[in-house]
Image (tube, coloured by chain):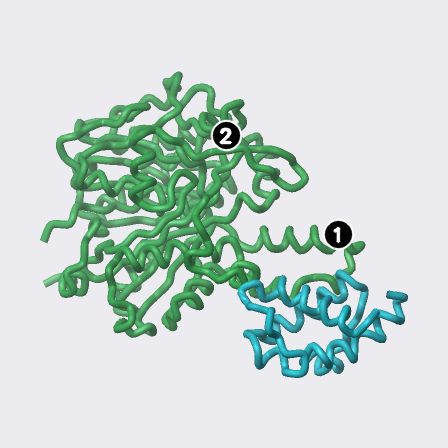
Amino acid sequence: MTKDACKQIVLDIIADIAPDEDLSNIKPDVRLRDQMQLDSMDFLDIVMELRKQHGIEVPEADYIHLASLDSCADYLTPKFEALGK
Amino acid sequence: MSFQPARIVITGIGLTAPNGNSLAEFRQNLLNGVAGVEPFDVRYMGRLIAGVCHFDPLRYQTRKGLRVGTRAGSISIYCAHEALKDSGLAFDSVPKDRVGIYVGCTEHGNVETENEIYAISKFNYDTKYWSHYHNPRTVANNPAGEISLALGITGPAYTIGAACAAGNVGLIHAAQMLRLGEVDVAFCGGVSESIHTFGIFAGFKSQGALATHEDPKKASRPFDKGRNGIVVSEGGCIYTLERLDDALARGAKIYGEIAGYCVNSDASDYVLPNPGRQAECVKKALVNAKLAAADIHIVNTHATATPQGDIQECEAIRSVFGQGCPDTSINNTKSYIGHCMGAAGALELAGNLPSFDDLIVHPTINVDDLDPLCAIDGLVLNTPKKVAKVDAILNNSFGMLGINSTLIVKRFVA
């Protein structure tokens, strides 16, 4: 699993969660919340979809790592790799 | 001098029915005999029939709003926006804390709960997959709350659980709140998302009260000998109500005036109607409206096409309008749209209101063989009837646990 592939997985989830948003110009190093309308329930959606679709658990203490695409990739890529993905 | 409550008038209507997404379209289809029942797939049960609404939810909601909210919320938002637009209110200048939202519901939360149980069934019923949206979706005030969020209304917004009498009760409650001075504008009526819960179909089927017919459009057939139960439908109808003085001051179009009403209870059975109490409800509404039975020109019946329920309502109506009411026409709107549950009373009233202008009574359709036990004077069957006068419309809406509601709307005369 490359970090770019991991970012794409997160982007695909966000596309379902925030279907009205234009995701074509998302900056990976900027907080997602600063680039689009995402509230706390939306972040819980990201956590839920990672669990449902990929079997990945994100403990509440680690939610901070989902702030940007870059931080998502840094945090999630090892988790995907640990699952052999 | 006795207390004179404020006069309350209808100044806007927004609706979605299985056969129309505006009052004009709905009315035209009622006059043309166009039913809105169609084949519908129900989880665990397969292909059944239902009344399905085909409004465009994206007219007033984002795709995210649709994903997060409920079908009842979506129906409510569509209808409320349409009712607001129709009212011509300059909403920017209306204090939002003086606006009330009173939405009648037969039930709410079954759809969302069933969806979640189905979803976690794919994960061996592990509740960690249960949605964090479950609670905001299933709280009983959800449909009203979604209107509040959509329109930025900060006044009271809640639902009224009144089984299938709820549409009428939403209007009645709003009129009371306007008269109390609690609010200056009310959005009120009823909504239903019930076709999206298998439980209501399964429950009626177990009860022997779910309609079947090879032609879905003929399945809802109140008063016909061959009727065999209820067609479950979704729908919504929200009215804009105001005190007459306010409506006149802004030059509003007025559909009609709330003349009187009654809500009472059978206190006799969980599901079986009680014609004596139904008749009492109608009579009390007439007294409340200061009208005699003969003053009513249209009675919209609640009849749902169950074998026994139709007979009992006809018995109630016969006892009130059976003699000395030559100008009273009696119809039924469920024969076109099935039973829209919490929306039924509000929708069926709306379908009749244009009669004040066109002096036409839409008929009960699908009556090929009138049940003699339902043969009451004044029934309008299968063909619209032109009448000389429509000054008062009486709308019946009854529900389980023995709740009855009667609402009378009269032609507005200054």
Under circle 2, the secondary element is loop
Residue B229 has which mark? 2
Within 10 Å of the Cα at label 1, are there few (<14), some (14-19), or many (20+) other Cα atoms? few
Looking at the picture, do discs 1 and 2 lie on one chain? Answer: yes
Residue drawn at x 42%, y 59% is B60
Note the chain letter of the cyan one: A
Residue drawn at x 56%, y 36% is B40
* B218 relative position to B239: left or right: right
Taking the image as drawn, is residue B272 in sight?
Answer: yes
Q: From the viewer's side, name the closer residue of B404 and B396.
A: B396
Q: Are marks 1 and 2 in contact (CB under 8 Å)?
A: no
Residue type at mark 2: give it. Answer: Gly
Vertical relation: B335 (above or below) B354: above
Q: From the viewer's side, name the closer residue of B185 and B41.
A: B41
Residue drawn at x 68%, y 65% is A13
Residue type at mark 1: give it. Answer: Ser
Where residue A16 appears, x then y in whole percent?
63, 62
**Pointer 1: what residue?**
B121
Where residue B116 appears, x then y in whole percent?
67, 55
Please give the chain letter of the residue carrying mark 1.
B
Note the chain letter of the green one: B
* B106 relative position to B26: left or right: right
